[in-house]
Image (cartoon, rainbow, N blue to C red):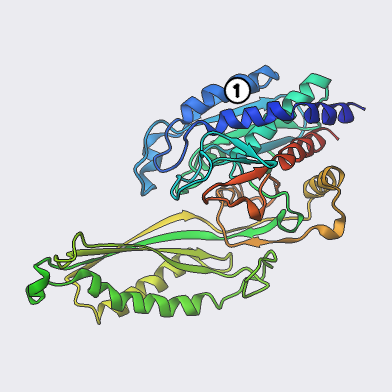
Amino acid sequence: MKLDEAFRLIDEREHALVATLRDVIRFDNSVPPGRNYDALVDYLEPRFAAVGMETQRVVVPEEKLACVPFELEGPRVNLVSTWRTGLEPVTVYAHMDTVPVEEEWQHDPFAGEVDNGRMYGRGVTDMKGSIATLLTALEAMKKVGLEPKYEIVAAMCTDEEIGGYPGVYHLAREGMVRGHVLCMEGFQDPKLCFWLGSAGMIDVAITTKGKSCHSGMNFLGVNALEAMVPILDELLLLKEEVEKRESEIPSFPMPGSLSPQMTPMFNLDIIRSGTKSNIVPATCMVVLNRRYIVEEDQEDVKAEIQKAIERGKKRSKALDVEVRFDCDYPAASYNARTPHVQRMREAMKLVQGYKEEDFAYGGLSGSTDMAFVAQTLKMDDFVFCGVARPDGNIHGADENVRVSDLIAHAKELVYYFCS
């Protein structure tokens, strides 16, 4: 059977798959600022064209990015590659951007080192690994003469990690997302595979204004950091209330989770104030990250945060308080009982040896740009399957992926497209 031939070819080409991923992660596409999308597309486009796919570059217009609260650099170049068959379409999605490198790594984050069966590098799980597995799967199909049962639309997209106006949102609005969506940002762990929901996300930047002076004569100024404290008190009280709420959507089983259901998340994540200890700070800025469930309304979420800030202001000595809301992602629910999801389950059972009882269905309080697609196209037909596992340290130092999972994912894609 040609399917078996493709699987054998993928096994034989393990080193080529690793080399492809190594090539892909050498491009620093961390966002912000999100440079080098065009350079990565320069590498990817000939690979997709070589298997006979029509390719199109789609640049997000600059004016669409005004809602993004980060400094961006370079064109937001998306690549759409289509394997024409005239059959039912499927949009196969990956994002090219990664989060920045912060902590110290034991492995070079852009070298793609392999150690004890794992490959290390920024983006190997989230989600450049899936770009390499997709290329490997398509090239194996072409080599052995396997024809897909779908018209494959491969969308390599920008700016998922910052939201606001990511590339796939633009493609959806332009009618370039067709059919159901196979999102390759997912897991090989069967307990985390099939998503029922994802959280919306709002960032709130709160700035208290004071008056600087010598810290030895603090009565001459207004300490903006101290003026932030009553506001923080009110926000932490709201956090207690918010995180008791539960969605009707069950959560994936996660160690330490306080509820079997999806719950909102409320985090004070950034605080900046002061330059030297002998200067009373004139400003203090806090960023709050709020994840909201599908049952919550975005405007209601913003309103209750604003009310908490107003309560804190009444006890604060701040000369002024500025508040900015950045609505980064909507919340969404997904249908995990479609024939397409069943097809991916069968692929994973065949390749990884999983049994039906191994799979779990749930929601994550993380956010995804797939919610923009769901909202824009009013659809819930999404399949999530990627190369990640919880022990891969996604977004952290020494992010890594099992080479065996890269091989497995390439085979699962072949099965999904061609079985």
Task: Give residue 136's quadrant in the image.
Answer: top right
Could you tell me which quadrant the N terminus lies in?
top right
Residue drawn at (55%, 23%), measured in percent from left and top? 43
Where's the C terminus, which quadrant? Answer: top right
Percent coordinates x, y for residue 142 in the rendering: 77, 21
**Residue found 39% across the figure and 47% down from its top:** 68
Tag count = 1
Residue 324 appears at what percent x and percent y? 33, 60
Q: Which percent across, then down, holds residue 285?
A: 29, 63
Type of amino acid under label 1: Thr
Residue indicated by mark 1: 55
Left or right side of 348 for 225: left
Dot 1 crowding, Cα within 10 Å, few <14, some 14–19, many 20+: some
Residue 95 vertical position relative to residue 246 in the rendered view, above or below: above
Residue 321 to residue 97: above or below: below
Residue drawn at x 79%, y 25% as measured from the top left: 141
Query: Would you say 348 lies left or right of 61 here?
Result: right
**Residue at 53 percent of width and 50 percent of height:** 395
Is 102 or 175 nearer to us in this picture? Answer: 102
Q: Position of residue 159 (x, y in %)?
A: 48, 42
165 vs 291: above or below: above
